[in-house]
Image (cartoon, coloured by chain):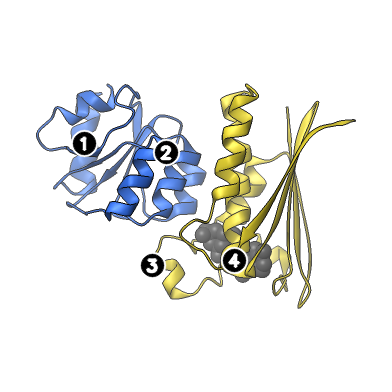
Chain colours: A blue, B yellow
Amino acid sequence: MTVYELSQNSQFNVLTMPEPERVINGAYVGDLLSWVMGKAQYDNIWITIMSNINVVAVASLSDVSCVLLAEDVTLDSEVLNTAKEKGINILSTPLAAYEAAITISGMI
Amino acid sequence: MSEILNFHFQVDGNDFTSAGQASIQIKKILRRLGLDPEIIRRVSIAMYEGEINMVIHAHGGEADVNVYEDHIEIILKDNGPGIKDIEQAMQEGFSTAPDQIRSLGFGAGMGLPNMKRYTDDMKIESEVGVGTTVTMCVNL
Ligand SMILES: Nc1ncnc2c1ncn2[C@@H]1O[C@H](COP(=O)(O)OP(=O)(O)OP(=O)(O)O)[C@@H](O)[C@H]1O
Ligand SMILES: [Mg+2]
């Protein structure tokens, strides 16, 4: 499934999607940045409730295909602009991390 | 082994929001060189962890990346407080990060273990009150 395909589901809202064709091959759930860098795999969607600027750098360096903000967590416009610039897809969802993960799992 | 490329960065210890710029820059450069994506990922994550450590724990420092024919060397040097017990610092979960840093998602005590795991060789030289130098090597 691509990030674009996920974004077509009404439970997932696009905050920024500069790379819609990136593939989602699985998910990693976590809020501690060093855990994410240690464990998330290339092309995973990263589900988190963290939304500060460092999330963009971590997403970029770990090569995740998308950041998904669970629980309707919002994002500063500054963070959003940086993500757009760096080619990082960010979606949000009202779902909790667990529900988001099982929904995505059913779509992959 | 002759050095083919080297890159030098000043890592600002005050600007937490732009921390990671050197690593992101290196990632771009290595991509342009056409290196294997998995190698690039390992180098840039290991460097980012080290770069963030200099910002959080040592008021910034300097980063040097040397690209050789058969390996990449990353040297991170700071004049911060130093590390008293390196063995303890290397343990997963050990962290002295303050609360406001933890609230940003750092401070899991996984940075140094990640650096070790993602590189083929890692050496820490540190003296309390003088500073820390971390040297990492990734084979190509
Ligand atoms: N450059 C440095 N100067 C001084 N102390 C350091 C330096 N790098 C690491 N340390 C010490 O080693 C500890 C462990 O570092 P490590 O990177 O593993 O975890 P962390 O930075 O606390 O959290 P995380 O990396 O998971 O966000 C730090 O909390 C700090 O006490
Ligand atoms: Mg660290």
Compared to residue A17, the image places residue B102 above or below, namely below
Kindly identify the amino acid type of the residue bearing the numbered disc 1.
Ile
For label 4, the residue is B13
**Which label lies toward us, 1 or 2?**
2
Query: Which of the two labelled residues, at mark 1 and mark 2, occupies the earlier sequence position?
Result: 2
Residue extending farthest to the right is B1
The verdict on label 4 being within 8 Å of ligand 1 is no
For label 3, the residue is B103
The lab-note entry on whether marks 1 and 4 share a chain reads no
**Which label lies toward us, 1 or 3?**
3
For label 1, the residue is A102
Tags 1 and 4 touching, CB below 8 Å: no
Question: Is there any visible trace of residue A28 in the rendered image?
Answer: no
Position of B90 compared to B52: left or right? right
Measured Cα–Cα span from mark 1 to mark 2: 28 Å
Residue B99 lies in quadrant: bottom left
Disc 4 secondary structure class? loop
- Quarter of the rendering occupied by the C terminus of chain B: top right
Measured Cα–Cα span from mark 1 to mark 4: 40 Å
Residue at point 11%, 38% (across, down): A11
Kindly identify the amino acid type of the residue bearing the numbered disc 3.
Ser
Tags 1 and 2 touching, CB below 8 Å: no
Percent position (x, y) of residue B68? 80, 31
Q: Chain of mark 3?
A: B
Query: Which of the two labelled residues, at mark 4 and mark 3, occupies the earlier sequence position?
Result: 4
**Which label lies toward us, 4 or 3?**
4
Residue extending farthest to the left is A10
Tags 4 and 3 touching, CB below 8 Å: no
Disc 3 secondary structure class? loop
The label number, if any, that marks residue A86 in the structure image: 2
